[in-house]
Amino acid sequence: MAKRQMTIPVILVIALFFLWGFAHNLNPILIPHLKKACQLSDFQSAFIDSAFFIAYFAVALPAGYFMKRFGYKQGIVFGLLLFAVGAFLFFPAANTREYGFFLGALFVIASGLTFLETAANPYINALGNPETATQRLNLAQSFNGLAATLAPFIGGQFILSGKTLSAEDKVSMSATDLAAYLQSEADAVKMPYIVIGVIVLLVAILVSRTSLPEINEEMQVDDGSAGGKSLWQNSNFLFGVIALFLYVGAQVGVVSFFIRFSEQVAGVQEKAAANMLSVALLGFMLGRFVGTFLMRYVTPARMLAIFALLSVVFTLISAGVEGMFAVYAMVGVTFLMSIMFPTIFSLAIGGLGKNTKQGSSILIMAIVGGAIVPLAMGRLSDWFSMQSAYGVPAVCFAVVLLFALRNINSKVTQVAVVP
């Protein structure tokens, strides 16, 4: 396909990076918001992440089979339709104020995103000259990071009310007034998610009417480093799956509980904390550019080891001190997390040859870590404090450090996939 004909497909695929980045990063807003609206504990509110990320485990392989049968374009369209349906389901969920209904809507959204991520990650590399694949990927990364920065700010403005009732306030209110307050909190999600659903539906229509090239997946080259072993005999790949599982769990937990963490350790109000989260995720986006630049001089595995070690240190600091210093340390962790997913992915999948597609699907399934680790954090928060719960991601980053050290001599020289 000619260069000019590639422009529109590239723009559409980059738009997918933005859309799923935006959806992912509304969860940190939903966690404190639905905690109020549905009167949840920290453990119960963590099921927002569980419902979202367990879809990656359940749907990744079916998504791969769907696209093998019908092609990437149909997979993208179907994923967008699922995304839109899930967003529209927030309207009846808010009317009923049933937490399970919200979780079901999030599962549908995440199922759609699984289709999009399974398609877009290899697609952006295939759309054009292989020599400029890294440039296209960096461009896609920037829009994913932009969405991550905007989502908490926009969600904080249009969803969070800034009003949290204490136990004494609830006791002093009449049942009618309390019910009205809780319903108004639930209703706040309606319009934002309707707008999201409409936009996603329009993108689905645009994609369906655009000519997109198909990818020849049989062109994968085996560099011999896999040694002819199956995936289940490849210890580095298996370690990579574990590291990715724990990293995604740590990332989701760190970001999702950021607002609650800021409230508890430094008394930051929820709207201000949401704005701080936007700044932190801006650092996440900038960290990708800084990390990409530094990888010209430092191998990805060494860079991953350095960032993972610093993440362990910063997280332990956040779990051990009080006040704004703890919050600033956690902002630093979001910067350090920036390179971890793509680097772990690339180190784990390097040299798999014909097993690359299967390996990619399994690694995408490992994103289910985002459904498990936050639950552990929520339970620890209920038992002890939100601050103590941040010891869990410290352990996760330590495992990532061990994986990085194992790959110090890896031949992988560039990062090729982003979440």
Image (cartoon, grey):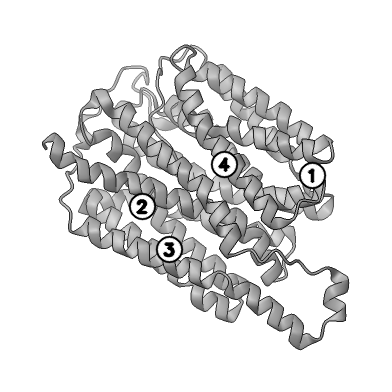
Identify residue type, mark 1: Gln
Q: Tell which circle, 2 or 1, labels the residue nearer the N-terminal end.
A: 2
Identify residue type, mark 2: Phe
Give the quarter of the image for residue 98. bottom right
- Whether pointer 4 and pointer 1 mark residues with C-beta atoms closer than 8 Å, the reply is no
- Whether pointer 3 and pointer 4 mark residues with C-beta atoms closer than 8 Å, the reply is no
| Residue in view at x 65 percent, y 33 percent | 333
Residue placed most toward the observer, 292 or 249? 292
Q: Dividing the image into 4 quarters, which one contains the C terminus? A: top left
Disc 3 and disc 4: Cα gap in Å? 20 Å
Is residue 49 at least partly visible in the picture?
no
The image's mark for residue 325 is none
Q: Tell which circle, 2 or 4, labels the residue nearer the N-terminal end.
A: 2
| Residue in view at x 79 percent, y 69 percent | 165
Crowding near the residue tagged with mark 2, few <14, some 14–19, many ≥20 C-alpha atoms within 10 Å: many
Crowding near the residue tagged with mark 3, few <14, some 14–19, many ≥20 C-alpha atoms within 10 Å: some
- Whether pointer 1 and pointer 3 mark residues with C-beta atoms closer than 8 Å, the reply is no
| Residue in view at x 45 percent, y 54 percent | 58
Q: Dividing the image into 4 quarters, which one contains the N terminus? A: top left
Q: Tell which circle, 4 or 1, labels the residue nearer the N-terminal end.
A: 4
